[in-house]
Amino acid sequence: MKTIAGLPTARGFAAGPVFIYRGDGEIPIREYVIEEHLVENELRRLQRALVETKRDLEGLISVLKERTGRSDVRVFECHLMILEDIVLQDETKDYILKDRLNAEAAVRRTAGGARTQFERMNDPYFRERVRDLDDIERRLLKTLIGYDRNPKLELSTPSIIVADDLTPSETVQLPKEYVLGIAINGGSTTSHAALLARALAIPAVTGLGDITSRVTPGEKVLLDGTNGAITLNPDKATEAEFETLVKRQKELAEEVSSGNPAGTLKDGSEVLIYANIHPGVPIAGVKEYGARGIGLYRSEYLWLANEVEPSEEEQFEAYRDAVEFTAQFMPPGASATIRVLDIGGDKMVRGITVKESNPFLGNRSIRYLLSNREVMRTQLRAILRASAYGNVRLLYPMVSCVEEMTEAACVLESIKQELTAEGIPFDKNIKVGAMIEVPSAALLANELARHCDFFSIGTNDLVQYTMAADRGNEAVAHLYQPLNPAVTRLVKMTIDAAKCAEIPISVCGESAADPVVGLYWAALGVDTLSMSAAYIPVVSKLFSSLTREDLNEYAKIPDSLSFGATAQAIYSACHNWLVTKVPGLSENLV
Ligand code: PEP
Ligand code: MG
């Protein structure tokens, strides 16, 4: 039996056979002869791809070394050796220079030749190296063509998916009924693939290093998404223990859904707990977990799932379903907050988003919509039409200045006039809000509040942009801390601005689902926490053990530490306070 540690990414436990997912197999490339004057350029492209791939591998190695010790990095060191092999490099350059092949074709030719040589060798060690060669070839080709793969996964038995990485589109296309859990070499807890796993209530562990080469297809493993570990060759006792954990988690969910509404404190006061959802996730689950409304509807998944622009009618039907569901099954007054298209960054849609050198700082989200008015108008029409069926709130993502809100308001106003002229019903007083997820928005919260009916803090991005730490990059995961005072100050500023303007404020970033952090946001004064539904029972259970007075005490914990306390120290102090205050907490957190 061997247990490998990774990052706890989506809560829950799963036991089952391994399915190794290797993306879409061979990456399709175009092979062509280049004109002589382009040879230099092609050599430069190759050189750039070699340098970038080397950098990626070195990054991976240093992270793994830190976490797991030398032996675990062998695979990637071997990849690096292959990448730097002068013979292979020269051969590739020759294909460009002499045969005038494009760089992609040259890489494929070289890899093909080396693969044949390795396969001919009798030594099983060398035959195994074919896999390494495949990996390197894929990395290089992906770097060369900026590849965005989007394969479908054919699964016939419920399995634990083991993969190098999963893009959001790959994750969203997983056949959910067959996916027991997800284990990933790279990634981080806040990548969109990770969020999806949570939204889909699929237990997941990321940052496992080289898990794809440590397991064999079909072998049984235990995956612990709560603590971030995967166990290979489990013994009987461990398996039995695992079963108990699975059972306990189910009981907790049942207990909460049959008790007080989610977010009721011991003294009867409330912090509303809503669910984050997106098209493609069975909405019924939201009710099962006790959500009191929909705090974030990630509309972009209509684009991501099919990679085509959804029509107004398709959008309208999807939004109306969510709105009707909220009206029918959630408590009176519940709202469905529909966020408009939030693409760009790591949510790229082939044929729609364009390649940018720095997509996280590019023409994304509200910026994209304001510069693609037809897309914006179609979506706003669909959302407004859905608002005739229940309580809808309209949310703009990635707002970074007041002008974006005023410009968006003009577009909305013209759509309202259009619908009125057409005699189409909609909510004339639809509430409009801004996501506060970039530092400039938090700093401008007082000004933005004048143009908003509500705020929703997106901590996933707010942490990323405040700390300049990519939310999907495991190598900088240590910087990605919601309780870093730099972040909490911005959150506090936003809450103060909302209180001053008397508008509601929620947190819809996944940090709300971490009981230690979610409670802190509530203690600072947010009215609503919105999270992946599967997390609601645990957070709700915690709230039911505390009073408002406890929350006030909790809010003061960071101030009670010495000046300059680290994010980690603040987190530990909050965690310790909770463990002392709520006996049996660690059990509930399972
Ligand atoms: C956020 O940034 O916190 C958020 C909720 O939006 P997303 O995760 O979809 O970027
Ligand atoms: Mg965001």
Image (cartoon, rainbow, N blue to C red):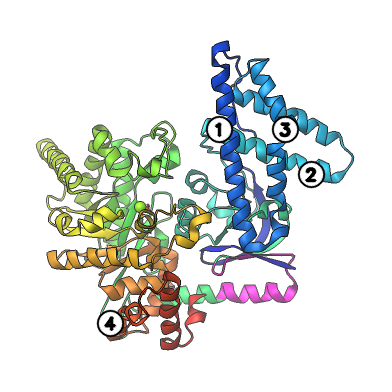
- 561 above or below 447? below
Identify the mark at residue 450; answer none if there is no mark: none
Q: Which numbered mark, 2 or 3, is in the foreground of this view?
A: 3
| Residue tagged 2 | 128
| Residue tagged 1 | 48
| Residue placed most toward the observer, 520 or 270 | 520
Q: Answer few, some or many: residues within 10 Å of disc 1's Cα (few below 14, many 20 plus, some between 14 and 19).
A: some
Which region is colored magenta? 226-247
**Residue 156 pos. (x, y %):** 64, 49
Which residue sits at x=59%, y=30%? 47
**Residue 409 pos. (x, y %):** 15, 45
Q: Which numbered mark, 3 or 4, is in the foreground of this view?
A: 3
Q: Earlier in the sequence, mark 3 or mark 1?
A: 1
Q: Which numbered mark, 2 or 1, is in the foreground of this view?
A: 1
**Residue 57 pos. (x, y %):** 61, 46
Q: Answer few, some or many: residues within 10 Å of disc 3's Cα (few below 14, many 20 plus, some between 14 and 19).
A: few
Give the amino acid type for the residue marked by disc 4 in the picture: Asn
**Judging from the image, what secondary structure is the residue with disc 3 in?**
helix
Give the amino acid type for the residue marked by disc 3 in the picture: Ile
Q: Answer few, some or many: residues within 10 Å of disc 4's Cα (few below 14, many 20 plus, some between 14 and 19).
A: some
| Residue tagged 3 | 86
| Residue tagged 4 | 552
**Judging from the image, what secondary structure is the residue with disc 2 in?**
helix
Q: Are marks 1 and 4 in contact (CB under 8 Å)?
A: no
| Residue placed most toward the observer, 550 or 199 | 550
Which residue sits at x=36%, y=54%? 461
**Cα distance in 3D space between marks 3 and 4:** 64 Å
In the rendered image, which quarter is residue 133 located in?
top right
User: Disc 1, ligand 1: is the CB inside 8 Å?
Assistant: no
**Cα distance in 3D space between marks 3 and 1:** 16 Å
Q: Earlier in the sequence, mark 2 or mark 3?
A: 3
Q: Are marks 3 and 1 in contact (CB under 8 Å)?
A: no
